[in-house]
Amino acid sequence: MALLPDAVFMSMPPMPFEYQGRDVVARFCAGIFRADRRFDLIPTRANGQPAFGAYLHSPNGISLGTGRYVLTLTLTGDRICAMQR
């Protein structure tokens, strides 16, 4: 969450869900990536931007793809100014 500026924006097209602001986006991500859930985050790229696939470990040992997160970085490349899930 330290990489998110105050005005970070998150969307989930084609669903109409949008979140703006560091606290709101952090709460959303905390709900997805809770301590009682284990994920593998696999780095990739989408549309030339950094991204990662999120794979949730299920009780039967199979990892289930739960989404791809595409990151938009600030011009200096040191912060995440937007995310699309």
Image (spheres, helix red, strand yellow):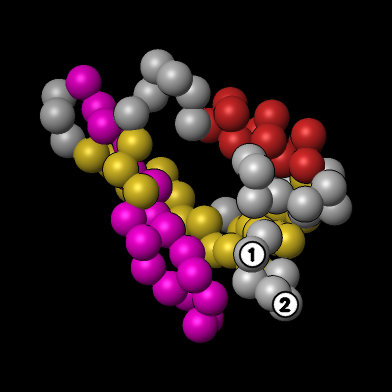
Q: Decide which of 77, 35 is in the foreground and name it.
A: 77
Q: Is residue 57 left or right of residue 26?
A: left
Which residue lies at the image location 53% right of the left edge and 76% below the top edge? 49
Separation of marks 1 and 2 at Cα, in angstroms: 8 Å
CA neighbours of label 2 inside 10 A, class few (<14), some (14 to 19), many (20+) = few
Q: Which residues are magenta?
A: 42-59
- Asked whether 47 falls inside the magenta stretch, the response is yes
Residue 31 to residue 65: above or below: above
The location of residue 37, given as percent across then percent down, is 38, 24
* Residue 38 located left or right of residue 27: left
* Outermost left residue: 61
Q: Which amino acid lies under the numbered mark 2 shown in the image of this protein?
A: Leu
Q: Nearer the viewer, residue 32 or 15?
A: 32
Q: Position of residue 2 (x, y in %)?
A: 65, 43
51 falls in the magenta region? yes
Crowdedness near tag 1: few (<14), some (14–19) or many (≥20) residues, C-alpha within 10 Å: few
> Where residue 60 sits: x, y (%)?
15, 24
**Quadrant position of the N terminus in the picture:** top right
Q: Is residue 16 left or right of residue 41?
A: right
| Numbered disc 2: secondary structure | loop
Which numbered circle lies on residue 75?
2
Query: Residue 66's x, y, as percent?
Result: 41, 44
Q: Amino acid at mark 1?
A: Asp
At x 21% / y 21%, what residue is drawn?
59
Residue 1 falls left or right of residue 52: right
Q: Main secondary structure of the magenta part?
A: strand
Residue in view at x 64 percent, y 51 percent: 3
Residue that numbered label 1 is attached to: 78
